Image (cartoon, rainbow, N blue to C red):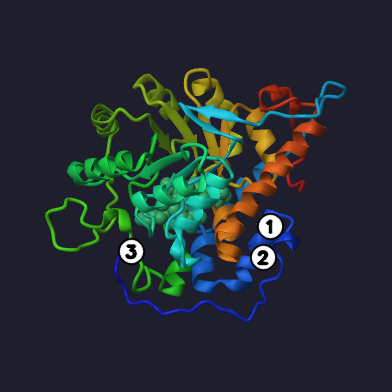
Amino acid sequence: MVSAPRRTTTPRTEEPPGALEDLLTVREFEARARRILDPVHYDYIAGGARDEVTVRANEAGFARLSLLPRVLGGTAERDSAVSILGTRASMPVLVSPTAFHRLVCAEGEIATGRAAARADTILIASMASTVAIREVAAAARAAATDRDPALWFQLYLQPDPQDTLALVRRAAAAGCTALVVTVDSPVLGVNERNVRNRFHDLPPGLACENLRNLRGDEPDTVRRIGMSPELNWDDVDRLRAHTKLPVLLKGVLHPEDARIAVDRGVDGLLLSNHGGRQLDTVPATIELLPEFAAVAGRKVPVLLDGGVRRGTDVVKALALGATAVGIGRPLVWGLAVAGEEGALRVLELLRAELDHTLALCGARGVKDLTPDLVRSAQAGAR
Ligand SMILES: Cc1cc2nc3c(=O)[nH]c(=O)nc-3n(C[C@H](O)[C@H](O)[C@H](O)COP(=O)(O)O)c2cc1C
Ligand SMILES: CCCCC(=O)C(=O)O
């Protein structure tokens, strides 16, 4: 984000909170969050690049697919646990990295870390967090007393490689067990809602805390996140040479790039169009998944995010070859509505819907999900 004059905004509080149990779906969480949040912040989160064609396509892509269940082969207890590059999660629904959680709740990423740890799933913490990764990790550890919390770190390779390495050291020291390098942002996408709202910077008091005193040789400063249009595959190789942590790439969309990534030894792929926030009019991620699974799926884990709002979406993605899915906006809506408890409720809703869908599909667990369970339906169905 770049500095520019901005309107100072305050949260709207006229909406009575209502019981969390009354919110039955991710979409109801979004509707509630929209009523609570400052509209400028709502627009930042909900919005996407330009005409938001891809934002809509992600959800529509799932709706165009039908499920074709099997019968008389199920079980009373279904197994949804997954293990990805050595990190275990109790369900294949991960928290994709989203920036600036203190915009929507006072505790920010502390609440997110606790919620993900209590849900026993992987949090991919954003480099653009408003709480430092060390503190997020400590909060997650305190919430997951009987196990190590599952924490990964997302980063943008910085224009100065020394900055990138400093970030990697911070993430490793905090206990992160994988790095997720976002490669779809040579430049930032343009969310025209932000332009109209003149939302170009964080409010006073909030900052990208992972970039505070990054090099340790400066007075108290918070660097800006830099985007690097000139990055290439060698930069990824260099990062991999500097860390023992597995490295996943987030935002590869072209199957040929997926093939290159695997050939160069990348450990995993997160098939993502950044929730439609980078290049507009790219395809829905679920549409690209079968091709991705064919190119990369037998060699490395393929994760997917973008438009996951229901347990049926999770099942479709897993059936088509994803090891797990990530949620971006739904988690933020949970935080906005009720902080840690709201975020946890969103994750638990998806867990329950996933388990219910597995039962209705006659599956004994996520390992039973195969491509024959998914059919293309008429375009536009919902
Ligand atoms: C408010 C917001 C902030 C985001 N910040 C980041 C980020 O810091 N790094 C990143 O790699 N992706 C970021 N993303 C993209 C998400 O990781 C994810 O790809 C996307 O939200 C998935 O789509 P969904 O919101 O439909 O679930 C952000 C998305 C949103 C909505
Ligand atoms: C430098 C902050 C990036 C946040 C981001 O990725 C998004 O809002 O989509």
Q: Which residue sits at x=18%, y=43%?
A: 162
Residue 9, position as x, y percentages in the image: 46, 79
Q: Residues within 10 Å of mark 2 (few under 14, many from 20)?
A: few
Q: Which residue is mark 3?
A: 207
Q: Which residue is mark 1?
A: 27
The residue type indicated by label 1 comes to: Arg
Near-viewer residue (246 or 275): 246
When the figure is inspected, residue 222 is found, relative to residue 148, above or below; the finding is: below
Report helix, strand or loop for mark 2.
Answer: helix
Report helix, strand or loop for mark 3.
Answer: loop
Of the residues tagged 3 and 1, which is closer to the observer?
3
Residue 154, position as x, y percentages in the image: 39, 43
Report helix, strand or loop for mark 1.
Answer: helix
When the figure is inspected, residue 304 is found, relative to residue 301, above or below; the finding is: below
Q: Looking at the image, can residue 114 be seen?
A: yes
Residue 255, position as x, y percentages in the image: 48, 28
Q: Label 3 vs label 2: CA separation?
A: 27 Å
Q: Looking at the image, can residue 281 be seen?
A: no
Q: Label 2 vs label 1: CA separation?
A: 6 Å
Residue 58, position as x, y percentages in the image: 60, 46
